[in-house]
Image (cartoon, coloured by chain):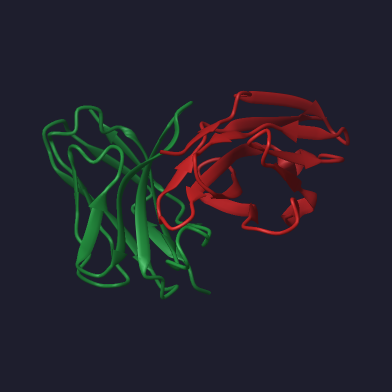
Chain colours: A green, B red
Amino acid sequence: DGGITQSPKYLFRKEGQNVTLSCEQNLNHDAMYWYRQDPGQGLRLIYYSQIVNDFQKGDIAEGYSVSREKKESFPLTVTSAQKNPTAFYLCASSIPGTGGNSPLHFGNGTRLTVT
Amino acid sequence: AQSVTQLDSQVPVFEEAPVELRCNYSSSVSVYLFWYVQYPNQGLQLLLKYLSGSTLVKGINGFEAEFNKSQTSFHLRKPSVHISDTAEYFCAVSVRGYQKVTFGTGTKLQVIP
């Protein structure tokens, strides 16, 4: 079955360390996204990529970085510059479609705790 | 820029009762609208979507939503809920021609036995 795999499910890091969250998809989707979810705040877009080797900042990109070297992979690095990194991170993908009409397919998320 | 408002953060409802989860959006241009469901510690799954055409949209698990352009609303309804419907529900909007999707803050549906 096709889908999106996020690993690990739970991640613990010390403050000041960079950490990379993995996202792999075998849906052959061109577009991939990273969202951050905090209680009561819904999902906020960190970065998105519509094609390999290209990505755009979302609403809360500060303190995060991404790469898109392969169609299947869109890793997210949470840097030490991110002031409040503890959150639930969701990766998603979609067919770009004719501008926004394609639904998002989500992974099961990575819960990051930084102490 | 588009925005989505889900006024109800929590909605308790008895099993087999009807439910309506409210969603209002703001955009100066045409939009696409979506409802997603999230079970604990999981990602989101698509319930239904409105792209164009009929304003009444049917989705999975017996849910439906009605697009009301004049009221800029897209409320989600189910005539009879089950315990298994306990989850968090998110309304989302994207502007035609753009790939960015904006989500509401979510509504937690608690079905009481």
Q: Position of residue A110 (x, y in %)?
A: 37, 47
For the point 30% across and 44% down, which residue is it? A58
**Coordinates of residue A103 in the picture (x, y in percent):** 53, 59
| Quarter where residue B1 is shown | top left
Q: Foreground: B100 or A108?
A: B100
Answer with left or right where residue B61 lies relative to residue B42.
Answer: right
Q: Nearer the viewer, residue A21 or A72?
A: A72
Residue shown at 58%/41% (left/top)? B91
Q: How many marks?
A: 0
Whether A85 is drawn above or below B64: the answer is above
Res A88 quadrant in image: top left
Task: Write the residue at 63% across / 34% down.
Answer: B23
Of the 4 image quadrants, the one containing the C terminus of chain A is top left
- State the image coordinates of residue A19 (x, y, percent, origin top left): 19, 46
Q: Is A80 drawn above or below residue A98 in the view shown?
A: above
Nearest the eye: B41 or A69: A69
Q: Position of residue A75 (x, y in %)?
A: 25, 57
In this picture, is A40 found above or below A104?
above
- Give the residue displayed 82% in from the left and 39% down from the top: B81
